[in-house]
């Protein structure tokens, strides 16, 4: 009996719910006067009704109808009727500058003539006020206030004057770091261009907060704060140092092409030091051996904000020995400048040199060899656009790079080659190089993401050599091939890498790489390399362990298991 009673009460309870549900009602409205409009409003309670009514009235106010009248008709058994009478339309006769300096108006991007003979619009006036206040807070007056003074009605026209109260003039005081970072406050102040004694600027602070995200060796530990005291502003930055300095060693096992059935062990060593001495200095060293007789060395150094200026200077040297064929050297110096929180502009000068090593038998050559001796001095311009959420380990956003250089290339006469072969060859020509990339990171949820990158390059010169060309292949370009496997005078390739995250910096991934390459120096047909594989990146207490298994196919390499590439290594961070 007790169970039956509970069952009956439950049914009764749910059966009564519809009776308590709020019934949707309809209100018809009519706009009369200089404009005519009708419509219906559906609402279930008074709050929803009031919001709908405010929206209609707001639209009429924006059109200049400020003197509205209303009438409400209640009709039993039928929808109520809400009648709105617009009255006359008000226009601005004039908004004069009042006490605002005309130069200040120009800097704020304001032309008061655009308000003449225009409908009185609350939003437009609010936008006008916002522009003036934004300009004020970026010129040392964060406490400025604005209003309209001397309002006069002339028929259906309104005239008024701007009244701007600037408030106290505020300057920047010292910048303070509240996190555990060992970065020097003087360096960050120069980097953000927030220096003591300069006029306060909210724009500088906003841009600076975004620029800190582009420093891979720092991370936020809280929200930045500003305090005002004695007409001075102090900026507090809660930033911590990130363990990004790295020592990276990778061992690769590849088929030995000279000794069949045996494996060739290759190696790579990378050392990267960031924010040395807390002044943003970066130093890098990269050494690599990618076959039995070939190796490369690259060193670079960055000195930011030289002598307190906004300029960065980077110097780099690259050496490549290609078995016993040639030796290339590349010295480059860059001058960089930040155009904003997302854009970095650089100009550079580059000196490249290539020397032929294998000269035996060339005295009997009938044509110039594909590898030659040259010197190339070039000047270029580079631009980088970044909107990554994290420079060190991005999950969202993108990165765009583009470089263009042009210079004079000189071909050197090699005494081991018959001099007659150089006849008719222009030994001094112009050479153009263009290279760029665009990468995009997608992050759908805490587990799934996608990394994609499109890269391309183009080189033009009537006397190109093989040791001039772009080098592609390997972990950083088209996987599934030996490092620097391809030579190309122009190329384009796409990397796509879905990722499954099982920790903050740890993930499994599969990948696919496809591209198109041309090598007109050796008169090879266009190649369309492709690769696929899988791997993982595992974060440990003091570094990251990487493992990648890849297969690649092209005109010169079969897509076969016996030519697969296995790369693994450990990147220690401190």
Image: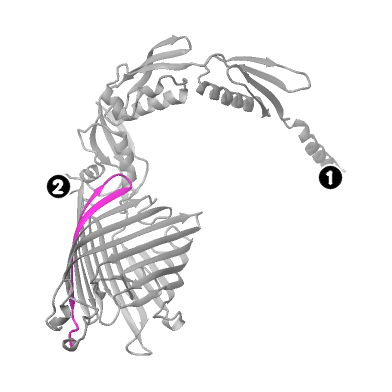
- Residue 342 magenta-drawn? yes
Whether the residues at callouts 1 and 2 have beta carbons within 8 Å, the answer is no
The spot of residue 463 in percent (x, y) is 23, 72
The residue carrying mark 2 is: 307
Q: Is residue 91 left or right of residue 427?
A: right
Which residue, given by chain and number where applicable, does mark 1 sit on? 3
565 shown above or below 167: below
How is colour applied across the structure in the image? one colour
Q: Mark 1 and mark 2: span between their CA atoms? A: 87 Å
Residue 250 position (above or below residue 150): below
Magenta span: 333-360
Mark 1: secondary structure: helix
Quadrant the C terminus occupies = bottom left
> How many other residues sit within 10 Å of disc 2, few (<14), some (14-19) or many (≥20)?
few
Quadrant for the N terminus in the image: top right
Residue 96 found in image quarter: top left
How many C-alpha atoms fall within 10 Å of the one at disc 1: few (<14), some, or many (≥20)?
A: few
Which residue appears farthest toward the right when viewing the image?
1
**Percent from the top left, x then y, of residue 165?**
31, 19
Query: Is 340 colored magenta in this rendering?
Result: yes
């Amino acid at each position: 009996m007790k169970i039956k009673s509970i069952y009956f009460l439950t049914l009764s309870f749910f059966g009564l719910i519809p009776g308590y549900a709020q019934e949707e009602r309809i209100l018809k409205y009519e706009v009369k006067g200089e404009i005519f409009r009708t419509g219906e409003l559906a609402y279930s309670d008074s709050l929803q009704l009031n919001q709908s009514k405010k929206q209609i009235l707001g639209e009429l106010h924006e059109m200049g109808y400020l003197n509205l009248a209303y009438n409400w008709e209640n009709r039993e058994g039928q929808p109520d009727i809400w009648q709105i009478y617009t009255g006359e339309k008000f226009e601005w006769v004039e908004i004069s500058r009042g006490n605002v300096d005309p130069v200040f108006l120009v800097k704020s991007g304001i032309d008061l003539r655009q308000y003449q003979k225009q409908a009185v619009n609350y939003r437009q006036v609010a936008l006008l006020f916002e522009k003036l206040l934004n300009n004020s807070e970026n010129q040392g007056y964060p406490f400025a206030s604005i209003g309209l003074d001397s309002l006069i009605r002339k028929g259906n026209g309104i005239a008024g004057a701007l009244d701007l109260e600037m408030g106290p003039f505020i300057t920047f005081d010292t910048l303070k770091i509240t996190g555990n970072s060992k970065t020097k406050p003087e360096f960050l102040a120069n980097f953000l261009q927030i220096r003591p004694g300069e006029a306060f600027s909210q724009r500088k602070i906003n841009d600076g907060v975004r620029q800190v995200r582009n420093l891979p060796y720092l991370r936020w530990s809280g929200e930045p704060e500003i305090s005002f005291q004695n007409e001075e502003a102090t900026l507090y930055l809660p930033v911590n140092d990130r363990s990004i300095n790295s020592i990276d060693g990778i061992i690769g096992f590849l088929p030995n092409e000279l000794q069949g059935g045996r494996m060739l062990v290759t190696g790579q060593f990378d050392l990267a030091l960031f924010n040395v001495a807390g002044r943003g200095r970066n130093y890098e060293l990269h050494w690599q051996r990618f076959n039995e007789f070939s190796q490369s060395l690259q060193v670079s150094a960055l000195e930011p904000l030289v002598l307190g200026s906004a300029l960065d200077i980077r110097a780099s040297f690259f050496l490549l020995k290609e078995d016993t064929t040639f030796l290339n050297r590349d010295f480059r110096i860059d001058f960089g400048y930040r155009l904003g929180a997302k854009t970095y502009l650089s100009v550079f000068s580059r000196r490249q040199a290539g020397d032929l090593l294998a000269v035996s038998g060339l005295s009997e050559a009938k044509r110039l060899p594909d590898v030659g001796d040259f010197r190339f001095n070039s000047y270029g311009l580079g631009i980088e656009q970044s909107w990554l959420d994290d420079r060190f380990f991005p999950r969202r956003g993108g990165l765009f790079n583009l470089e263009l250089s042009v210079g004079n290339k000189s071909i050197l006469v090699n005494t081991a080659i018959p001099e007659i072969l150089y006849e008719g060859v222009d030994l001094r020509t112009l050479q153009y190089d263009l290279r760029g990339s665009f990468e995009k990171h997608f992050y759908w949820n805490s587990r799934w993401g996608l990394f994609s990158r499109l890269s391309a390059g183009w080189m033009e010169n009537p006397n190109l050599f093989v040791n001039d060309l772009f080098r592609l292949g390997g972990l950083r370009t088209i996987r599934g091939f030996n490092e620097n496997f391809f030579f190309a005078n122009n190329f384009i390739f796409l990397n796509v890498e879905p990722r499954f995250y099982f920790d903050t910096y740890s993930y499994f991934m599969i990948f696919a790489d496809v591209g198109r390459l041309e090598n007109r120096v050796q008169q090879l047909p266009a190649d369309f390399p492709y690769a696929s594989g899988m791997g993982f990146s595992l974060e440990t207490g003091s570094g990251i362990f990487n493992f990648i298994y890849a297969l690649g196919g092209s005109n010169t390499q079969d897509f076969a298991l016996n030519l697969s590439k296995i790369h693994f290594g450990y990147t220690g961070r401190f």
